[in-house]
Image (cartoon, rainbow, N blue to C red):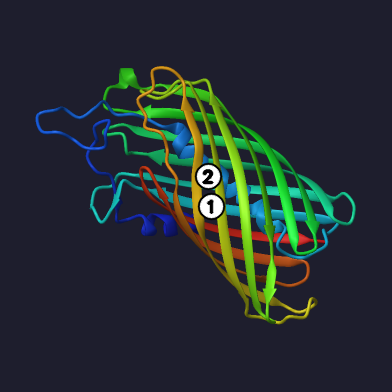
């Protein structure tokens, strides 16, 4: 866990924030910068999306659902307003999640999972938003040979606290964060070792309660993500021998809607392109995977690392 946090800090060491922007995205001469705005929702959603993406990995191999599937993942991420500045501002976080699923027939599986995520957001001027999230989820997964699909429902408690210069303005807020996501992917073999995997994922998030300084007490966001992965089998093709695979995945996440509650000063999130590089390998019952990703967001470029292990029997 410590090593992953160090990797994220190194990857984000050059990431920083630009000066506070006016509502249209630019500061005008003679106008003072707007008051700092905290966004615990925007800090938490990348972590939840990383946890949910594990479900798609479970369907990639093998074609038949094992009787028992257990996994453990670690995540590290950072987000900035700009890259190349020396200031130590931005969003950085770490999290861990694990789960267990049982076969419900030859093609279906049902499971539960839980995760803990922590992040610091220092993009809102002098304020540093500390966000802690505890989430539990249930899911259903089905494999039809080369096609796999998943449906996931989750609920969590989000705790956020401002660490600002004025102690009287600081406070701890607790919110409920609900989410639902579903996805489908198909793996197409091209020759003996090359794999092409298009995927489509839809997700929805709702935050309720715990109004943050300058942000909404309620927020609803929905998005659709389309990607295509090019994979190459580096190891043995025999099912009972160690395998190794590298995937390069690219696509775009498009925001369908992003609605706020009253008295909100945040700008709506917008979609952007994403790129992932993943290396996975293992034997019949055990596998390891590592992934590095980058994604365009309204607040800057997001960088994430993921390490995980899976045991099946």
When asked about the image quadrant of residue 308, the answer is bottom right
Crowding near the residue tagged with mark 1, few <14, some 14–19, many ≥20 C-alpha atoms within 10 Å: many
Q: Position of residue 71 (x, y in %)?
A: 70, 55
On the rendered structure, is 82 left or right of 221? left
Residue 5 marker: none
Q: Is residue 178 or residue 290 the one in the foreground?
A: 178
Crowding near the residue tagged with mark 2, few <14, some 14–19, many ≥20 C-alpha atoms within 10 Å: many
On the rendered structure, is 264 left or right of 309? left
On the rendered structure, is 39 left or right of 102? left
Residue located 23% across and 52% down the image = 86
Q: Position of residue 72 (x, y in %)?
A: 66, 54
On-image quarter of the C terminus: bottom right
The image shows residue 203, relative to residue 206, as above or below, that is below
Are the two marked residues, 1 and 2, in contact with CB atoms closer than 8 angstroms?
A: yes
The image shows residue 30, relative to residue 269, as above or below, that is above
Q: Which residue is mark 2?
A: 47
Q: Position of residue 84 (x, y in %)?
A: 25, 56
Numbered disc in front, either 1 or 2:
2
Q: Is residue 149 or residue 72 the one in the foreground?
A: 149
As drawn, which residue projects farthest toward the right? Answer: 105
The image shows residue 110, relative to residue 3, as above or below, that is above
When asked about the image quadrant of residue 235, the answer is bottom right
Q: Position of residue 16 (x, y in %)?
A: 28, 48
Residue 75 marker: 1
Indicate which disc, 1 or 2, sits on the residue closer to the N terminus.
2
Separation of residues labelled 1 and 2 (CA atoms): 8 Å
Q: Is residue 94 or residue 105 the one in the foreground?
A: 105
Residue located 27% across and 22% down the image = 166
Residue located 69% across and 65% down the image = 187
Q: Secondary structure at mark 1?
A: strand
When asked about the image quadrant of residue 167, the answer is top left
Q: Secondary structure at mark 2?
A: helix
């Amino acid at each position: 866990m410590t090593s992953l946090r160090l990797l994220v800090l190194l990857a984000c060491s050059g990431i920083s924030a630009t000066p506070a922007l006016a509502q249209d995205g630019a500061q005008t001469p003679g106008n003072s910068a707007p008051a700092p705005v905290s966004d615990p929702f925007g800090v938490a959603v990348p972590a939840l999306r990383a946890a949910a993406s594990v479900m798609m990995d479970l369907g990639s191999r093998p074609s038949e659902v094992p009787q028992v599937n257990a996994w453990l993942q670690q995540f590290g991420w950072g987000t900035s307003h700009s890259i190349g500045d020396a200031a130590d501002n931005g969003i950085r976080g770490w999290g861990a999640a694990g789960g267990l699923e049982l076969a419900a027939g030859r093609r279906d599986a049902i499971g539960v999972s839980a995760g803990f995520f922590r992040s610091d957001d220092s993009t809102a001027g002098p304020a540093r938003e500390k966000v802690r999230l505890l989430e539990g989820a249930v899911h259903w997964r089905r494999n039809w040979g080369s096609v796999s699909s998943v449906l996931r429902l989750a609920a969590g408690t989000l705790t956020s606290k401002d660490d600002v210069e004025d102690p009287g303005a600081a406070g701890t807020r607790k919110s409920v964060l609900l989410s639902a996501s579903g996805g489908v992917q198909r793996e197409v073999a091209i020759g003996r070792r090359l794999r092409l995997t298009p995927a489509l994922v839809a997700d929805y998030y709702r935050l309720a309660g715990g109004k943050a300084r300058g942000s909404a007490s309620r927020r609803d966001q929905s998005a659709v993500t389309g990607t295509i992965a090019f994979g190459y089998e580096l190891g043995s093709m025999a099912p009972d021998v160690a395998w190794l695979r590298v995937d390069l995945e690219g696509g775009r996440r498009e925001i369908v809607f992003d609605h706020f509650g009253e008295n909100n000063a945040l700008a709506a999130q917008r979609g952007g392109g994403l790129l992932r590089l993943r290396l996975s390998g293992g034997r019949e019952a055990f596998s390891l995977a590592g992934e590095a990703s980058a994604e365009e967001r309204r607040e800057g470029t997001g960088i994430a690392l993921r390490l995980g292990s899976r045991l099946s029997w």
